[in-house]
Amino acid sequence: MNQERIRTNLDAVLRRIAEAAVRSGRRADAVRLVAVTKKCPSDWIRPLVECGARDLGENYPQELWRKSEALADLGDSVRWHLIGHLQSNKVKKTLPLVRMIHAVDSLNLLRALNDAARALDDPPGVCLQVNTSAEETKHGWTEEQILSDAEPIAACRWIPIAGLMTMAALGTTAESARESFVRLRVLGEKLRGQMGLPLPELSMGMSNDFEAAIEEGATLVRVGTALFEGVEP
């Protein structure tokens, strides 16, 4: 029963992603789903992968370590993403396990990742987290700070800087969240010029607002709740 429900949910989310991408003037496959598996048991994750999900996102490094080991038999069919805060003392263990780190929220953390990436043949990409909602509880650069740090950020050449990431303010609707997404897209355009980097990725949008994020340029959406709605323990 759960596998059928997961398949139905996944198909619905992928359809909504494709439709929003087309509305934004892009191909349906221009946006990638990162399926957020935070707090999900392994017996929910396996059917999700069997139904076609490949990019899996975890908020906490320790949980990612545990699940990547428990699901190691899935091999290359899974690409792990860390989407939550990462402390510098967890960098070395996390970096080889992931395809992307979405919430690089400071120059110090970026430099720690850059140093650790020297030892890897194929280091994961990172997205730089920007606090576009100005909420004190959120991590990340302000827009002014990241523009000021553009030169030292661009000097980190060992770790691939893939793009930017943000979260809308708590309690926003899809429509009121749109301002945060626009601000990130505009900031990305400015940073490309300052850094001389392509910065192709915009990681923004979650279950309640991912369609608005896609319409404003998201290339990666982090969706969890909508995928597991109605799934029973």
Image: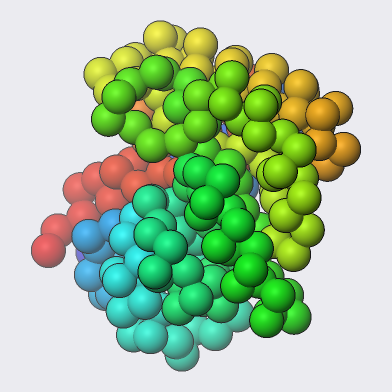
The correct choice, above or below, for 41 with respect to 180 in the image is: below
Q: How is the image coloured?
A: rainbow
Along the horizontal axis of the image, is 187 left or right of 138?
Answer: right
Q: Residue at x 34, y 55 (%)?
A: 59
The correct choice, above or below, for 32 with respect to 92 in the image is: above
Q: Split into 4 quadrants, where in the image is the C terminus?
A: bottom left
Along the horizontal axis of the image, is 121 left or right of 54?
Answer: right
Q: Nearer the viewer, residue 223 or 67?
A: 67
Residue 175 locus on image (x, y percent): 43, 10
The correct choice, above or below, for 171 with respect to 34 in the image is: above
Q: Residue at x 25, y 63 (%)?
A: 40
Q: Nearer the viewer, residue 15 or 216?
A: 216
Question: Residue lying farthest bottom?
Answer: 73
Along the horizontal axis of the image, is 126 left or right of 140?
Answer: right
Residue 80 locus on image (x, y percent): 50, 67
The correct choice, above or below, for 25 with respect to 37 in the image is: above
Residue 49 locus on image (x, y percent): 46, 69
Q: Residue at x 77, y 23 (%)?
A: 189
- The answer to whether residue 49 is seen in the rendering is no
Residue 191 locus on image (x, y percent): 75, 29
Q: Split into 4 quadrants, where in the image is the N terminus?
A: bottom left
Q: Nearer the viewer, residue 22 or 197?
A: 197
Q: How many marks?
A: 0
- The answer to whether residue 17 is seen in the rendering is yes
Res 88 quadrant in image: bottom left
Q: Nearer the viewer, residue 146 or 53?
A: 146
Q: Residue at x 68, y 80 (%)?
A: 120
Question: Residue lying farthest left?
Answer: 233
